[in-house]
Each structure stands twice: as structure tokens, then as C-alpha cells.
């Protein structure tokens, strides 16, 4: 790991130290690394250089909104290639929270998320994307691991 030195005016440093205290960072370096990663990720997305990504889409919606539950489910089925998992939580008599874990090419993941958030009755939608490198390979399980065979697999290795 390389060391770098930065200069900040006193007021900015005070605000930054308060920020890292509120967020629970143990030191400035950890906070700066996270901020740099986030900004690089935003830059990749803005430039359309996202490649593949894994993402977490979360949103709250009113399940009494006409046909909204059905439309959301149909949209997920239509893009089942992006879906890894869905968590559905009943918050009260009207509102549900859904968390959808997605993977795929960044434009498709982003388009699905934006279309979902734009549905009438969906509120508090947010997509958290992490650029990922697709690693394809094969490995085998030996006799001591319950079964013995080789199989293909795909990993989505987070970038940076």
C-alpha cells in the first residue's frame, strides 16, 4: 500500500473528522479509501464504463396501489436473468419493503432499477451498484467433500 499526503484547510478537516466519527471509521485512511472507491464507481457509471455489476435495489411500496404488486412481480420475472434474490418484508398494513439483489451488465441492472423505482406507488427507492469483473472457471469437488465431480461456475469479483 502506498502512502500519500494531502492538505486540507482546518475547517474542512474538522468537518471530515466529524463525518468519520459519525460513520464509525477508525481512521481517516479508511474513510478516504471508501470515498475514493465511491467516486470512482460513480465515474465509471457516468461514463458508461460499468461493465458488469452486482447491486442491491431497495424500495418501499404501498401494496394497496392498484396492481402494483403484480406489476413488480411480472417485471422481476421478465428480467429473471438479473435476479439473484428477493426479500419481501411487510412493514405495516399498507407498506412493504423489498430488497432485490441483482447481477448483470450495468446498463441492464440500472435500467431495471430505474423502471422499478419509477412505478407509481414505489417510494424510497435506491440502487447500490458495485462494478464487478466476471470470472468464469471450473473446479472440482473431491471425494471427501460429499460428491466428486467438476462443474462450471461464474464469480462476480468486485472491482477496486
Image (spheres, rainbow, N blue to C red):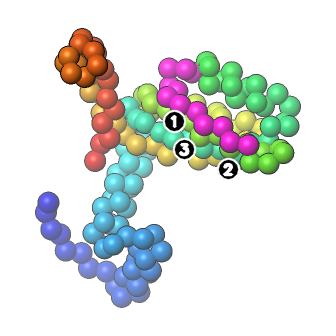
Please rate how many residues cluster around mark 1, counting C-alpha atoms within 10 Å: few if below 14, some from 14 to 19, many from 20.
many
Mark 3 sits on what residue? 127
Mark 1 sits on what residue? 101
Say left or right for 157 vs 80.
Answer: left
Q: Position of residue 91 (x, y in %)?
A: 74, 48
Label 2 sits on a secondary structure element that is strand
The residue at 44%/80% (across/down) is 18
Q: Which residues are magenta?
A: 79-90
Say left or right for 123 vs 32.
Answer: right
Q: Position of residue 158 (x, y in %)?
A: 32, 41
Label 1 sits on a secondary structure element that is strand
**In this rendering, is residue 88 above or below 3?**
above
Q: Is residue 92 visible?
A: yes
Quadrant of the image occupied by residue 50? top left
Mark 2 sits on what residue? 124
Viewer-closest of 106 and 147: 147
Residue farthest bottom in this picture: 10
Quadrant of the image occupied by residue 87? top right
For marks 1 and 3, give the CA distance: 10 Å
How would you classify the magenta stretch by its main secondary structure? strand
Residue farthest top in this picture: 149
Q: Are marks 1 and 3 in contact (CB under 8 Å)?
A: no
For marks 2 and 1, give the CA distance: 16 Å
Amino acid at each position: 500500500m502506498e502512502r500519500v499526503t494531502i492538505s486540507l484547510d482546518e475547517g474542512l478537516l474538522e468537518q471530515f473528522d466529524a463525518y468519520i466519527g459519525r460513520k464509525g471509521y477508525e481512521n481517516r485512511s479508511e474513510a478516504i479509501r471508501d470515498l475514493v472507491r465511491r467516486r470512482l464507481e460513480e465515474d465509471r457509471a457516468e461514463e458508461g464504463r460499468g461493465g458488469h455489476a452486482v447491486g442491491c435495489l431497495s424500495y418501499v411500496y404501498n401494496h394497496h396501489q392498484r396492481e402494483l404488486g403484480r406489476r413488480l412481480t411480472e417485471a422481476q420475472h421478465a428480467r429473471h436473468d438479473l435476479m439473484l434474490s428477493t426479500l419481501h418484508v411487510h412493514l405495516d398494513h399498507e407498506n412493504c419493503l423489498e430488497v432485490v439483489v441483482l447481477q448483470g451488465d450495468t446498463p441492464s441492472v440500472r435500467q431495471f432499477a430505474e423502471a422499478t423505482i419509477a412505478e407509481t406507488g414505489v417510494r424510497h427507492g435506491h440502487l447500490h451498484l458495485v462494478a464487478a469483473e466476471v470470472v468464469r472457471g471450473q473446479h472440482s469437488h473431491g471425494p471427501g467433500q460429499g460428491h466428486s465431480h467438476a462443474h462450471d461456475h461464474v464469480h462476480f469479483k468486485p472491482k477496486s
